[in-house]
Amino acid sequence: MDSQDSSPKQPRPEAVKSTLPQPGRPVPNRAYPGALIVVEGTDGSGKSTQLYLLKRWLEIGGYRLHFTEWNSSPLVKSATRRGKQRRLLTPTTFSLLHAADFADRCERQIMPLLQGDYLVLADRYIYTAFARDGARGCPQKWLRNLYRFAPVPDITFYFRAPLDVAVERILSGRPKLKYYEAGMDLGLSYDRPESFRLFQARILDGYDKMVESDNFVVLDGTLPVNKLQKQMRDIVASKIDLKRFAPRALEAE
Amino acid sequence: MTADEKDKEKEKSTVAEPPTANATPPGMVSKPGASAEEDSSGAFFSAPLVGFDPSEITGTLIVIEGMDGSGRSTQISLLQEWLESEGFAVQTSGLRRSNLVGRDIDQLLAKNAVTRLTLALMYCTDFFDQLEHRILPALKSGAVVLADRYIFTLIARSVVRGINRDYLSGLYAMALRPHLTFWLNVRPETAFGREFRKAQAISYWEAGRDMSLSHDLYWSFVRYQTMIKREFEAVAKRHNFLELDGEANVSTVNKLLRQRIADQLGIRSTKYTPSSALAHLWR
């Protein structure tokens, strides 16, 4: 990225040369050799547990992989935390801050690793924003544009659990729901668990609408953990050429 | 999965939609309250802001754009004093002044670890936080908002860094359309001298050094600011920029600004002499 040009006339045409996805243009097919697997679903759908087990399976097998989580960029985290604590966030700024977080991980981790031939596992991806920010009233058209720079996943697992099951899992294990987590900013109900339930119903609806258009692989979140994991591993093995991400020694065999 | 299957799947599942046709209806909103009733979508660039009713706007949004060293902040100080002397409540806004992320952006800029898209989105967050928590509340209460730069600078900076223009227009689709947008146009060479005198140095970002245009600071500044200036020229007509010669005297530029604003707000007299507190700005 350093400037080699000493001729004063030509600004470097970085946009054209760059192999990173250009915001506003779809990521070209096979712009990178790596593969991207993402999990989506409402809170309590079991997606994080399942992705963790998938990660362990691949790690133990020695595959080259990277794990990334929604809302975890160190550069943006403090702003998000402050915004939530002081309740400064509106649907628009809530959405934009999460997009900034995603952009940072996308530009500094996801894209470089996909180009470096890694398997990238993402716990929540852009569909979380489409479902959740959509539930807050952000227009879908605006949201889709906002995340246009994101590479399209090779597999998107959607863990679908009925509202009651998912909500019960969260409420039984958590002493107190956080303000934004419960969707209190939407003014659906003064009762936090009730607000959470109504908010999650909207999100579930948002996810269901994307199943077809965004090629979700739907898995039943109510199945026993090990059974579900078996399904997940079978699908990964059938859709992705895992040998490519194996350690060099194994590859040679 | 074979390569072909993979291709097909990607085609089907592609996230991208066709670029948003960024509606930029011609003609500016001339009377704040009235036009909002006529066409509620006209108050915003192309989509209404979530949870906000534009018919509540009774104030006036005035934007001053121009590169570093074009005299924006000097003019805003003077205009604020003049408007207050005329009995108008004034609110100001500017880049990186939001409570939400203003300081976070300062830190990102200082550390220089941030990439262009993340930075663009942080500035966008900063903009909407100010729009929702500072600009709109002031406009609802009938104040005059003087904005020291607006989305035009933010879009131009990202466009020259290779981010797609449609993408950016889409991001700012929910920005409020200003009632007046002034553009203080100066030559980058003049701006360089003015900026240098302020701090006896030129900052990394002012000179666009992240773009690796030149190792020479002067040339880096001039080339970067020229690129931004070209972007402004490209959108000036579409967004009804009122262009002023930023190289003229402070008092001359201020008079032109006052005349146009007085017209907008229905102020009869445009007479103004700065108070002793601001007299040093009057050249």
Image (tube, coloured by chain):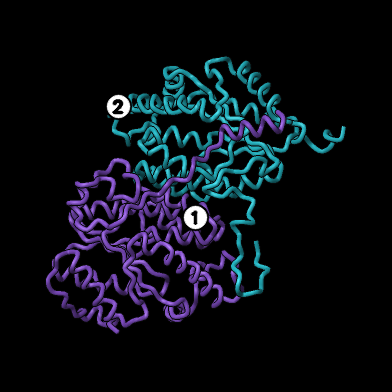
Chain colours: A cyan, B purple
The residue positioned 62% from the left and 45% from the top of the image is: A111
Q: Residue A59: in sight, yes or no?
A: no
The residue positioned 52% from the left and 25% from the top of the image is: A212
Name the residue at the right extreme. Answer: A253
Image position, residue B31 (x, y; %): 19, 57
Cα separation, mark 1 vs mark 2, equals 37 Å
Query: Quadrant where the C terminus of chain A lies?
Result: top right
Q: Is residue B152 left or right of residue B209?
A: left
Name the residue at the left extreme. Answer: B268
Q: What residue type is labelled 2?
A: Asp
Label 2 sits on residue: A191
Q: What element carries label 2?
A: loop
Q: Which residue is nearer to you in this view: A232 or B102?
A: A232
> In the rendered view, would you say A117 is above or below B232?
above
Q: In this view, does A250 lie to the left or right of B29?
A: right
Q: Which residue is nearer to you in this view: A81 or A94?
A: A94
> In the rendered view, would you say B281 is above or below B51?
below
Query: Quadrant where the N terminus of chain A lies?
Result: bottom right
Q: Pointer 1: residues within 10 angstroms few (<14), some, or many (20+)?
A: some
Q: Pointer 2: residues within 10 angstroms few (<14), some, or many (20+)?
A: few
The residue positioned 40% from the left and 33% from the top of the image is: A181
Q: What residue type is labelled 1?
A: Leu
Label 1 sits on residue: B119
Image position, residue B256 (x, y; %): 25, 75
Query: Residue A67 falls in which quadrant of the image?
Result: top right
> In the rendered view, would you say A251 is above or below A161?
below
Of badges 1 and 2, nearer the viewer stands: 1
Image disc number at residue B143: none
Q: Which chain hosts label 1?
A: B
Image position, residue B9 (x, y; %): 61, 31
